[in-house]
Amino acid sequence: MEHSNIIHPIIPSTAPATDLRKKAESATDARLHGSDLTKGFLGPGVWLFARARFLSKAILMGIVLVIPLLVLIVWQLSARYNDAWEARMQATTHHVELAQGVLAHFHAQEVANVLTREEAQELAKNTITKLRYSNDNYFWIHNVSSIMITHPMNVALNGQDLSQIRDAAGRAFFQEMIQVGAQEKGGFVRYLWQNPGESTPTDKISYVRLFKPWGWVVG
């Protein structure tokens, strides 16, 4: 047999790079599908993560790390807001209890016959009208018949029937205050209120409590 002396050149493969990448991905897929990591509800996520490029992995890792941090920040802010709101509610309750103490003092003077009821109520009303707390916060008094006894910020209401007054949302909140205030320890009522000189009503929440001897609701 004769041997040819012709040397056949080695021709480089012209297969596109994409074919090589597909083969590598196929090999990766084969390894993953045989792994326990791809089983269960986390399987699709593990599979996608393994196929992602380095940059995609870096971005994904960043997101994974940032999300818990954002959740923690939101939780802390919410907790601080709730704590501040709770502290404000407790302070408001305490202030109304102090105002109740003023009424109790003058009622004791009435019971001891030191003052008549009219005198005791007048002194109590004047004292409550002048009381302030936290700079511009005030107290008012109306009775269980929905008559305003004293309102330091809107004197035009004094002596007026409040039963038909409703806020911007249509709520008869003074009537609600009578019901809530009659509870053993009073309670909070939320409503919209427009003070004199203001153009729009403000969302407010007030603590109210009934002083039973006189039928006065203090808020």
Image (spheres, rainbow, N blue to C red):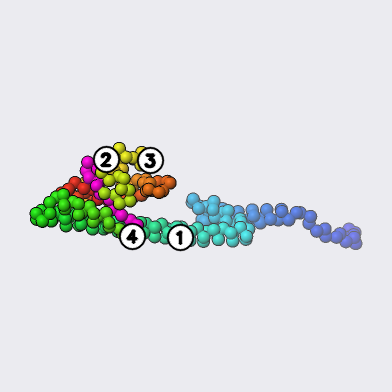
Rendered image quadrant of residue 82: bottom left
Q: From which residue to which does the magenta span run?
A: 134-149
**Would you say residue 179 is visible in this rendering?**
no
Question: Which mark is in front, 3 or 2?
Answer: 2
Secondary structure at badge 3 equals loop
158 relative position to 47: left or right: left
Q: Position of residue 43 (x, y in %)?
A: 52, 52
Question: Which mark is in front, 4 or 3?
Answer: 4
Q: Which residue is mark 2?
A: 161
Which callout, 4 or 2, points at the residue further toward the start of the chain?
4
Q: Residue at x 80, y 58 (%)?
A: 12
Q: Is residue 83 magenta?
A: no
Which callout, 1 or 3, points at the residue further toward the start of the chain?
1
Q: Which residue is mark 1?
A: 73
Disc 1 residue crowd, few under 14, some 14–19, many 20+, Cα 10 Å = few
Q: Which residue is mark 3?
A: 169
200 relative position to 27: left or right: left
Question: Which mark is in front, 1 or 2?
Answer: 2
Mark 4 and mark 1: span between their CA atoms?
Answer: 30 Å
Q: Position of residue 45 (x, y in %)?
A: 54, 53
Q: Which residue is mark 4?
A: 134
Amino acid type indicated by mark 4: Ser
Amino acid type indicated by mark 3: Ala
